[in-house]
Amino acid sequence: MSEINDTSVVKQQYATANNLNTRISIHDKYSTNKMGFGNWIVSNYRIDKGASVLELGCGTGDMWKGRESLISTCSRLILSDFSDGMVATTKETVGNYDNIEYKVLDIQQIPYKDDSFDVVIANMMLYHVPNIKKGLTEVRRVLKCGGAFYCATYGEHGIIEYLSKILFEYRVEDKINKNFTLQNGHEILSRTFSSVEKKEYIDSLAVTNIDNMVEYIYSLSSMTSLNNIPKQVIKEILIKNTTDGILNVPKEYGMFISS
């Protein structure tokens, strides 16, 4: 979640699913909102029968796993990512469907005609886009009139801010990428879209196995200052911050729906 504007760095960070899976698993295991962020995101989609859908930054594809009914609703579903590795993982996760295409592409240069899609999705990725204005202009271009653009993101007062406070003595800073957050996303999207709605997902982490949290921390690119610190040291700090054996960590996530 560190600030990344170099596309080569983004490709390196997301070349394989290992670090991403580590980060996803901590949420799966310890989120207090049992609905799950992915389920909540999908619950907000309005995809009509026969819709043409483009997802940018599909990641591991878990959002579409087991959603045959939603997939069948689409006349065309393009699952894309900037990383070849993520696209390959998504294809393995979701599988082959007559109406699904897997593509490696850049949101800044979407290779489709104007007014091609009823729905465009870009979850947890806009903060990585070097030229977000260009990326959003491309989304607006390929989105049909009356279509919807869904983009989930994080806020500025969640996990990273919390970790930077309790690990400050090891020079851990809050370097969260603030290029597109719940705090500034509405303003950014309003420059390109006439209608923007923000929805917030209420959640936190209640971690009972501190080892899992240690692995999560070391999977974060913003925690490079810890590379020479023994994991046991970090584990002991986390344990000191537990209450009744539980490490309570704030989360701040949500999404914008634009048209």
Image (cartoon, grey):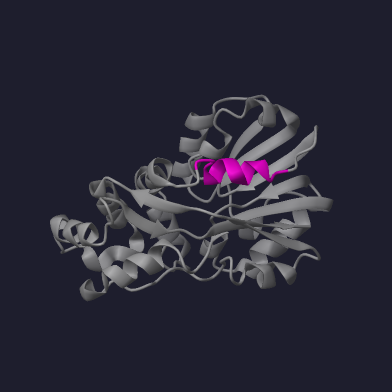
Identify which residue, 2 or 216, lies in the foreground.
216
Residue 44 highlighted magenta (yes or no): yes
Image quarter (top left, top right, bottom left or bottom right) of the C terminus:
bottom right
Quadrant assignment for the N terminus: bottom left
Say above or below: 191 vs 85. below
Front-most of 166 and 229?
166
Residue 258: horizontal and vertical position, in percent? 74, 58
User: Does 248 lie within the magenta span?
Assistant: no
Can residue 187 be seen here? The reply is yes
- Position of 175 with respect to 203 (left or right) is left
Left or right: residue 219 compared with residue 253 = left
- Report the magenta residues as a range: 34-45
Q: Quadrant of residue 77?
A: top right
Residue 114 seen in the current view:
no
Q: Position of residue 90 (x, y in %)?
A: 51, 36
Q: What residue is drawn where x is 35% and y is 45%? A: 22
Residue found 61% across the figure and 67% down from its top: 132
Choose top left, top right, bottom left or bottom right for residue 24.
Answer: top left
Residue drawn at the location 72% of the way across and 64% of the way down: 137
Q: Position of residue 197 (x, y in %)?
A: 72, 61
**254 w.r.t. 93: above or below:** below
Residue 177 position (above or below residue 152):
below
Above or below, comparing residue 115 to residue 228 in the picture: above
